[in-house]
Image (spheres, grey):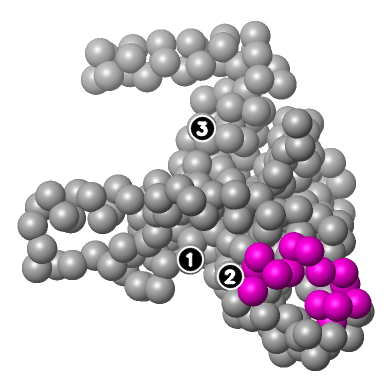
Amino acid sequence: MILLLKGGLVSIEAAMGSLKPMERRVAQYILEHPEKVVVLSVQKLAEYANVSEATIVRLSRSLHFKGFQELKLRIAGDLTQLSLPADSYQEIQTDGSIEQLIESVSNNNIVSIQDTLTVLSPQSVEKAIAALSNARKIGLFGVGASGVIAEDFKLKLSRINRWCEIGTGFDAQATIAANLIPGDVVFGISYTGQTEDMIRSLAIAKEKGAFVITLTRFGANPVSELADIQLFTSSLEKSIRSGAMASRIAQLNVIDILYVGIAGQHYEESIQSLEMTRKAVKAGKRNG
């Protein structure tokens, strides 16, 4: 049985804003003619889209695929789902019913996680888990809403006795980064991948020899370009209001995946740490 992977069209849509003009031209052609593209050679697609063959190769790599053949396989997987009911992001209506509100918010969160699964590389996740599991110290960086995600990750890692520090602003991030050494890991969270404080602090961490992992929106961006391992989420909705919510859920889902993976690397130790922290918190509340 041939396994058709999905995520080609989602990846293109998510990365559209970060593509170069000629890459965007062929990307738009693919979105408009997906059924045609899956049977085309790279030469024919270049002819139809009026771009060079090298542009198609660069587009495939920009989308984090090995080449055009993998991109076509992903698109073919997408097309197998065309006969099924398609979920999409819903605009949140403030004047609708409570039932509509529940449905639209929940739907957007679900779709955001599903879309993220198409752009989240299992190989990158595996490498990130290994790096975080073996790190001497972990620096967690996030600003604004991403800082909330970093706080959640710190709480989880602390429960299983991982030594980590958190920076939610440049001063704290720079201080942490300046004291990192080879063998340490810094994990930068920025949905847009454009956060200036994050870019500056990650650069400091790299200068100190720390291993850099980033979690950003899919596509080329300055934050992910500094990373040794790039992790991505996808949130394609147009509304700013729903975007901030759905993207956060997608990020938290990735954090949960990493946490469970790290805990599994040292299962017995993690179980003991979780039990000790649970008892400590319970005793503190009782004594208080």
- For label 1, the residue is 236
Given this view, does label 3 or label 2 mark the residue nearer the observer? 2
Magenta stretch: includes residue 49? no
Helix, strand or loop at label 1? It is loop
Q: Nearer the viewer, residue 200 or 1?
A: 1
* Residue 288 image point, x, y percent: 24, 20
- Compared across the picture, whether 82 is left or right of 134 comes to left
Quadrant location, the N terminus = top right
State left or right for residue 162 relative to residue 156.
right
Q: Label 3, on which residue?
A: 156
* Image spot of residue 287 (x, y percent): 26, 14
Q: Is residue 39 magenta?
A: yes
Vertical placement of residue 185 versus 273, above or below: below
Q: Secondary structure at mark 2?
A: helix
User: Looking at the image, can residue 262 be seen?
Assistant: yes
C-beta proximity under 8 Å, tags 1 and 2: yes
Q: Most prominent secondary structure in the magenta stretch?
A: helix
Q: Magenta segment, which residues?
A: 33-46
At label 2, counting other C-alpha atoms closer than 10 Å, the crowd grade (few under 14, some 14-19, many 20 or more) is: some
Could you say which quadrant of the image residue 190 lies in? bottom right
Look at the numbered disc 3 and give the secondary structure of its residue. helix
